[in-house]
Structure formats: C-alpha cells, structure tokens
Image (cartoon, helix red, strand yellow):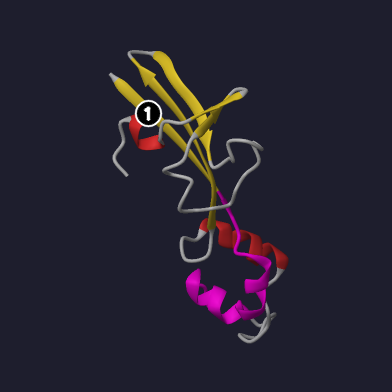
Amino acid sequence: MRRVFLDIETLPPAECERERLTYGALRRLERRPPCDEFRDTDLCTDEQFRQLALHGEYGRLLAIGVIVEQDGSEVLRGVYGRDRQTREFHLDERRTPSGSYCADSTCTAPTFAQNSGVML
C-alpha cells in the first residue's frame, strides 16, 4: 500500500499588501462580530497579518514537504519549493508543485506528481 504524507508551509501576504488589509476586512474573512477595540478602517495588527498565512485568499505557498511510503518503507522524502542550485526557498508558487525536490543534501529533477503518484 502506498501512503503519501504532505506538509504545506505557507507565508502571510507580501508586506506591501499590509496597507490595504483593514481590521474590517479581516473580521469579515474570519466571520467575527465587530469589536469595540478596533474600527473597521484600522489596519490589521501584526498577529492578524501573520494569521493570514492560513487563509487561501491571502496566504502564499512556501514549500511542500512530502514523504511517500510503499508497503511500510519510505521511498521518497523531500521538500518542494527550493531552488536547485542555491537550495534557498524560491517563493514562486507556480513552480513549487511542479519543480524539483531537495532531499537530504541533493536536489533531483522529477516532479512532485511523478514521485508521489498524486495528480495535481
């Protein structure tokens, strides 16, 4: 039996987006009632901004960690989202699921979908 384990790491929006993110917009996103402490036009707090990483509307994809087991044995372990040469995170959301993975100290070319058997 094949088992695939995924861990998706996300980031909040780019800092330049902060100015347009008001408390009111976040309150509606989180479906919270109004609060006397903030006006709807106030900018979001640092904590609220960081929490946006967990919302698909605002969060950015950093990396996908993957482990594939076949009949109880690990056959693949890697992180998608790193540049092949520098091994630094490239922050290119389109490239991450289709790019190469870095496993241990090497980066290899097969794509996420080819290795895991998961169709993207």
Look at the image and tell me whether residue 97 can be seen: yes
Q: Disc 1 marks which amino acid?
A: Asn
Q: Residue sitting at 46 percent across and 41 percent down? A: 99
Q: Quadrant of residue 25?
A: bottom right
Q: Say few, some or many: other residues with alpha carbon within 10 Å of mark 1 (under 14 / 14 to 19 / 20 or more).
A: some
On the image, the x and y values in percent for residue 71 come to: 33, 13
Look at the image and tell me whether residue 34 can be seen: no
Say which element carries label 1. helix
In the displayed structure, would residue 82 be above or below residue 16?
above
In the image, the segment drawn in magenta is 10-33
Which residue was labeled with disc 1?
115
On the image, the x and y values in percent for residue 88 come to: 66, 41
Q: Residue sitting at 56 percent across and 73 percent down? A: 26
Magenta-drawn stretch contains 104: no
Number of callouts: 1
Q: Nearer the viewer, residue 8 or 30?
A: 8
In the displayed structure, would residue 14 be above or below residue 85?
below
Q: Quadrant of the N terminus?
A: top left
Horizontally, is 52 left or right of 73 in the view? right
Q: Nearer the viewer, residue 39 or 44?
A: 44
Q: Quadrant of the C terminus?
A: top left
Magenta-drawn stretch contains 14: yes
In the displayed structure, would residue 109 be above or below residue 43?
above
Q: Nearer the viewer, residue 16 or 27?
A: 16
Q: Residue sitting at 52 percent across and 73 percent down? A: 32
